[in-house]
Image (cartoon, rainbow, N blue to C red):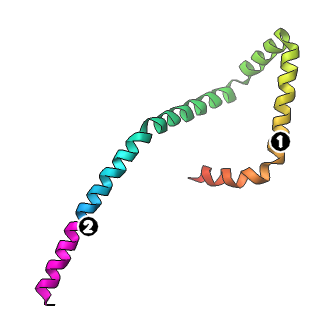
Amino acid sequence: MSEPDRLQLLLLRRERLVARSGQLRERLHGAAVVVQRPLAWADTVRSGWHTATHWLQQHPQWLAGGLVVLLIARPRGMLRWGGRLYAGYQLAQRSRPIWQPVANRFMRR
């Protein structure tokens, strides 16, 4: 095969690869549009959660006051939910060796 023929084949292959790359890029864009709204919603929720937790850290008296009001208004219900929350906390602490490495991997990204 002569050098010009080889160069011509390489140029043709390059054109095909560039065209294929464009097609794949379009397909990827179409797939990304489908998940764009749910991901935007998740970002909004995450941002709002961060803002709310930051505000609660700065104003813990509001959280404590709300809990006191609920405890006075519905003591039996609060004790029931308090027991459930404590049981959930204990479960989370016992299972921490399992989920902590996974959570650390996701938080680093």
Mark 2 falls on what kind of element?
helix
Residue occupied by mark 2: 17
Q: Residue at x 69, y 23 (%)?
A: 59
How far across and down, in percent of the image, does residue 69 sit?
79, 12
The three-letter code of the residue at mark 2 reads Leu
Q: Quadrant of the N terminus?
A: bottom left
Q: Which secondary structure type mostly characterizes the magenta part of the structure? A: helix
Q: Residue at x 55, y 32 (%)?
A: 45
Which of marks 2 and 1 precedes in the sequence?
2
- Total numbered labels: 2
**Residue 60 falls in which quadrant of the image?**
top right
- Residue 2 forms part of the magenta stretch: yes
Q: Residue at x 73, y 21 (%)?
A: 63
Residue occupied by mark 1: 91
How far across and down, in percent of the image, does residue 76 sit?
88, 15
Q: Which mark is residue 65?
A: none
Q: Is residue 12 above or below residue 74?
A: below
Q: Please, which residue is most extreme toward the bottom here?
A: 1
Dot 1 crowding, Cα within 10 Å, few <14, some 14–19, many 20+? few
- Residue 8 forms part of the magenta stretch: yes
Q: Nearer the viewer, mark 1 or mark 2?
A: 2
Q: Is residue 44 above or below residue 107?
A: above
How far across and down, in percent of the image, does residue 12 sit?
17, 72
Region of the chain picked out in magenta, as a range: 1-16
**Residue 62 falls in which quadrant of the image?**
top right
Q: Residue at x 13, y 90 (%)?
A: 2
The three-letter code of the residue at mark 1 reads Leu
